[in-house]
Image (cartoon, rainbow, N blue to C red):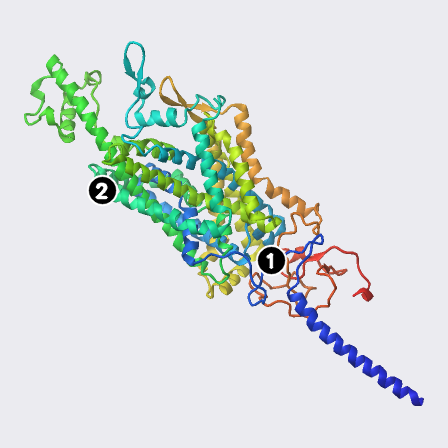
Amino acid sequence: MPKNSKVVKRELDDEVIESVKDLLSNEDSSDDAFKKSELMVDDQEEKDVDVEEGSDVEDERPAWNSKLQYILAQVGFSVGLGNVWRFPYLCQKNGGGAYLVPYLILLLIIGIPLFFLELAVGQRIRRGSIGVWNYISPKLGGIGFASCVVCFFVALYYNVIIGWSLFYFSQSFQHPLPWDQCPLVKNASHTFVEPECEKSSATTYYWYREALNISSSLSESGGLNWKMTICLLAAWVMVCLAMIKGIQSSGKIMYFSSLFPYVVLLCFLIRGLLLNGSVDGIRHMFTPKLEIMLEPKVWREAATQVFFALGLGFGGVIAFSSYNKRDNNCHFDAVLVSFINFFTSVLATLVVFAVLGFKANIINEKCVTQNSEKILKLLKMGNLSQDMIPHHINFSSITAEDYNLVYDIIQKVKEEQFDSLGLKSCQIEDELDKAVQGTGLAFIAFTEAMTHFPASPFWSVMFFLMLVNLGLGSMFGTIEGIITPIVDTFKVRKEILTVICCLVAFFIGLIFVQRSGNYFVTMFDDYSATLPLLIVVILENIAVIRIYGIDKFMEDLKDMLGFSPSQYYYYMWKYVSPFVLLCLLVASIVQMGLSPPGYNAWIEDTAMEEFHSYPTWGMIVCISLMVLAILPVPIVFVVRRCNLIDDSSGSLASVSYKRGRIIKEPVNLEGDSTSLIHGKSPSEVPSPNFGKNIYRKQTGSPTLDTAPNGRYGIGYLMADMPDMPESDL
């Protein structure tokens, strides 16, 4: 070897050593840089808010101030107007106390397991409904969009009900209450009672004529009802102001809006139990009719009530839970909120039937008085003999029991002529059997009962303020189910989106404050949510249990909760809940097909409701509501399946999972066991510094669509770029 060759070799060795040192130092800095890296799409930097546990980067996603605030938010969302005016009606209609048995069974089979499932995926992935289902399977990303559409439809008419409650609340500060007596009409010659009111009742007249000023059909719009338009505007302003800062603003309001209804219900229960006839109402309510419990219709209606009572499929449950820490015990939350919801329904049922028992007792006393006068007239006219009347009966102060005794005697003696006498059987049970629900319960039956309360304006103010708070609690969750997914996905400012959403909803909602608006509320309530939400929840179950994997999901729950959930949930999610949901979907479709599509129109001349079928354009609207609500599911599936949208275009595909995680074996993605919980630490493999935070897909590597936990679960997020030569790296 030449003399100077050793020198040259030494110099080369020194350069290699220095190069290796530089490479190692660069590798460390490169890896640190990657740990804090951000995915840049279309050259726009986005702040990383989806930070893994243990990362040095602060998690900037909003969080609940306390566990109590979060529980109150979930309770406020799930406990709504349906607990007050739907559950008591179903309980009365479907066997009284016996109805609680199928309700509790279905709560355990589909209610708690599916509620737990939504809480778990929202809490772990920390995104709204769009992001959650994109994360698990991009092809099922349309589930989240469908939830948003349904939430928007429901918000449109639900806030109208809050507007109605605000109107009655504003009219309650006067004595006597304006719906206490029928109005008098004066003309040139004399004064008389309004005929429409005389044919119905004071509260019925006030609801249909004074409040709604309702038209006679869906096709007769009649123009805007300015009183309800102002109330609807006030309702949307309240929702907008409460939601404009997200959970930072709405969370504080939850302390009042969620707790105040319980104060009112307890006050009403105590007051109601002191009223004459309240015990009769409660006894009638909880007297079980076991033969009715075996009817399939009872189980279908119980399943539907469980489904909607917990707010499944709306996206509000997922949105609220996404602001939790990942180690929060969401299983405890699911059980707690579900049973709070159930006991609230039972409490509301006690209150409703204590008050309705009092109302029925008053009506029964009037019936006894009127018919006793008829009997006295028949005795004076000689149509009835005095000998058939027991000697102890005093018609001037006759009781209901004595009247029924006389009634039975006359019916037996005058069997052939009895119908011509015009006597009525005054039974308090007959009055309690008149099932009322929804607006008929809140704005007619309950308001009529409150007119007989001492200090009736005070109780009216409390009742309608309770309805406003119940409605607002549900509206907060519904709007959160719209705002959170869109903010997470498209990175718009929450304040601007909230204002735009409320403005658009108010202007569309003007169709509900026409004179025919009540008929549109019925249409949206019947057709915009029921079937779409059932389909959404079925797809949610399939996405988690079949596509993501039930075993992997159970492991995720173990890592997140710190203990293994009961195998009960394994079998419910995998077998029982999907089967029950499919049966409920089929039963709902059959029920919808058998029931003629229509609405109850108020006829002014007869002062009665009359069933009308929807016109052709009304049927088109009904079908369109169902189709539009579920349409995002097949659209997104086709778009993702056929790759119609470039994954790097920043559109539907580029939801906000900005920072990926390196996997150790990128070649075997199909067999990778990484789950939502695993891989908590950031990059474990050194990565070269590419100079930009855009990572190239290597030629021949599998696409990330094959990852078992969805596109954004593991690995780098890579933009489509032409292959670069090794020298460029």
* Residue 424 rendering spot, x and y as whole percentages: 21, 23
Q: Secondary structure at mark 1?
A: loop
* Residue 637 rendering spot, x and y as whole percentages: 63, 45
683 relative position to 518: left or right? right
Q: Along the polypeptide, which appears first: circle 2 or circle 1?
A: 2
Quarter of the C terminus within the rendering: bottom right
User: Nearest the camera: 93 or 331?
Assistant: 331
Look at mark 1 in the image and give the residue it sits on. Answer: 709
What is the spatial separation of the Cα atoms under label 2 and label 1, in whole angstroms?
55 Å
Look at mark 2 in the image and give the residue it sits on. Answer: 273
Residue 239 shows in the view: yes
User: Nearest the camera: 180 or 270?
Assistant: 180
Name the kind of residue labelled 2 in the image: Leu
Up the image or down, 643 lies above or below 686; here it is above
464 relative position to 687: left or right? left
Quarter of the N terminus within the rendering: bottom right
Name the residue at 45% across, 32% down: 230
Do the residues under discs 2 and 1 have CB atoms within 8 angstroms?
no
Residue 427 shows in the view: no
> Badge 1: few (under 14), some or many (20 or more) residues near its Cα, within 10 Å?
many
Name the residue at 52% across, 37% down: 505
Name the kind of residue labelled 1 in the image: Asn
Q: Secondary structure at mark 2?
A: helix
> Badge 2: few (under 14), some or many (20 or more) residues near its Cα, within 10 Å?
some
Up the image or down, 715 lies above or below 627; here it is below
Nearer to us of marks 2 and 1 is: 2
* Residue 390 rendering spot, x and y as whole percentages: 7, 25
Q: Farthest right residue?
A: 2
